Amino acid sequence: AQSVTQLGSHVSVSEGALVLLRCNYSSSVPPYLFWYVQYPNQGLQLLLKYTSAATLVKGINGFEAEFKKSETSFHLTKPSAHMSDAAEYFCAVSDYSTDKLIFGTGTRLQVFP
Amino acid sequence: GAGVSQSPSNKVTEKGKDVELRCDPISGHTALYWYRQSLGQGLEFLIYFQGNSAPDKSGLPSDRFSAERTGGSVSTLTIQRTQQEDSAVYLCASSLAGGPQETQYFGPGTRLLVL
């Protein structure tokens, strides 16, 4: 069965600092991996996704993630945090055994001036 | 273009009442999903419609929950005899053709509070 683990329910960084949000997955078949962002009282917005092409995936708002099969990881990074990045971030996995998304528990990012 | 819309945005109901939540997917999207977001359970899948295929109901938590999709477009999620543990945000998503690598586009959600 698929699963996603997001280490750290809360991450705090200073504006301009590196953002690193961790995601590890479990899947018995090649996975498809997604990062979504949720701003307060809004739905989820796709940041980026991995679909077995390039292992380094670039997304919106300067975010990127690298698929590492050997580590079963898909960590999200951004070189320089902005105040507007404060939100909750969800990692999700799917594969050909199911079309639905399996989500991690989310990481709330706080950005301090 | 227009995104996924959901109504109502907020719903307060009394325990034991029935509620209906509506989702309008992006025009032309054949796949439609319902998820539930709650403090205790995080984001969990409820049900998936793809074209004319039988829906995947594997995530529905009890037989009090049902959903239908009429004309391949609008979907309604119905919760009968609501319980306090049904309080959550119900999110609808749609994708162009279904499939595990397709991007799912989410609506703003319906926040349900059962008193």
Image (tube, grey):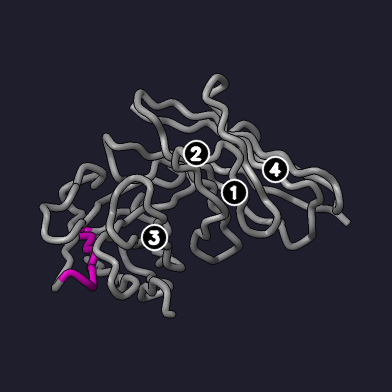
Q: Which residue is mark 3?
A: B91
Q: Which amino acid does the dot numbered 3 rest on?
A: Leu
Q: What numbered label is drawn on residue A104?
A: 2
Mark 1, secondary structure of its residue: strand
Measured in 3D between alpha carbons, the distance from the residue under mark 4 to the one under mark 1, in whole angstroms, is: 11 Å
Q: Which residue is mark 4?
A: A77
The numbered mark, 4 or 2, whose residue comes first in the sequence reads 4
B7 and A43: which is toward the camera: A43
Q: Disc 3, disc 2: CB below 8 Å?
A: no
Q: Is residue B78 magenta?
A: yes
* Label 1 chain ID: A
Q: Quadrant of the N terminus of chain A?
A: top left
Measured in 3D between alpha carbons, the distance from the residue under mark 3 to the one under mark 4, in whole angstroms, is: 26 Å
Query: At x 49% / y 42%, what residue is drawn?
Result: A50
Indicate the position of residue A96 as horizontal and vertical percent values: 29, 37
B57 and B52: which is toward the camera: B52
The numbered mark, 4 or 1, whose residue comes first in the sequence reads 4
Q: Which residue is mark 1?
A: A89
Q: Residues within 10 Å of mark 2 (few under 14, many from 20)?
A: many
Indicate the position of residue B23 as horizontal and vertical percent values: 31, 70
* Label 3 chain ID: B
In the depicted structure, whether residue B10 falls above or below residue A97: below
The magenta span reads B72-81
